[in-house]
Image (cartoon, rainbow, N blue to C red):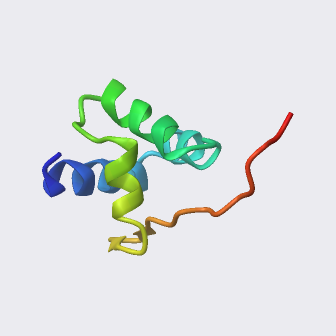
Amino acid sequence: MALDQLKSFLHKMQEDKNLKDEVLSSSTADDVAKIAQRLGYDVSGDELLRFSGEKVGKVTVKKNDLPGEYN
């Protein structure tokens, strides 16, 4: 992934309320990456996690530390 791909996706998310809502309702970084890939951005879940804490425009990428589910 080029950093510009991730930044471009985050800027698009700021401009598109529906996209923002879809991203915010995603459970994992991989889910967000799939949304970005569907729109033509070369972004992976691992790259999003490594970008955690960084800010692009009005968006701060933040890793949520939620406990896993156990069956």
Q: Is residue 50 left or right of residue 4?
A: right
How many discs appear? 0
Could you say which is closer to the camera, residue 16 or residue 47?
47
- Which quadrant of the structure image shows residue 36? top left
| Outermost residue to the front | 71
Q: Is residue 43 left or right of residue 65?
A: left
Name the residue rendered at 53%, 63% in the picture: 63
Could you say which is closer to the camera, residue 16 or residue 67?
67
- Which quadrant of the structure image shows residue 45? top left
> Residue 21: image x %, image y %?
59, 45
Indicate the quadrant containing the N terminus: top left, top right, bottom left or bottom right: top left
| Outermost residue to the top | 38
Indicate the quadrant containing the C terminus: top left, top right, bottom left or bottom right: top right
> Residue 20: image x %, image y %?
51, 48
- Which quadrant of the structure image shows residue 58? bottom left
Q: Is residue 1 left or right of residue 36?
A: left
Q: Is residue 58 above or below residue 10?
A: below
> Residue 50: image x %, image y %?
35, 62
Name the residue rendered at 17%, 57% in the picture: 3
Q: Is residue 44 above or below residue 24?
A: above
Q: Is residue 27 above or below residue 51?
A: above
Could you say which is closer to the camera, residue 69 or residue 18?
69
Could you say which is closer to the camera, residue 46 or residue 54?
46
Name the residue rendered at 60%, 49% in the picture: 24
> Residue 66: image x %, image y %?
71, 58
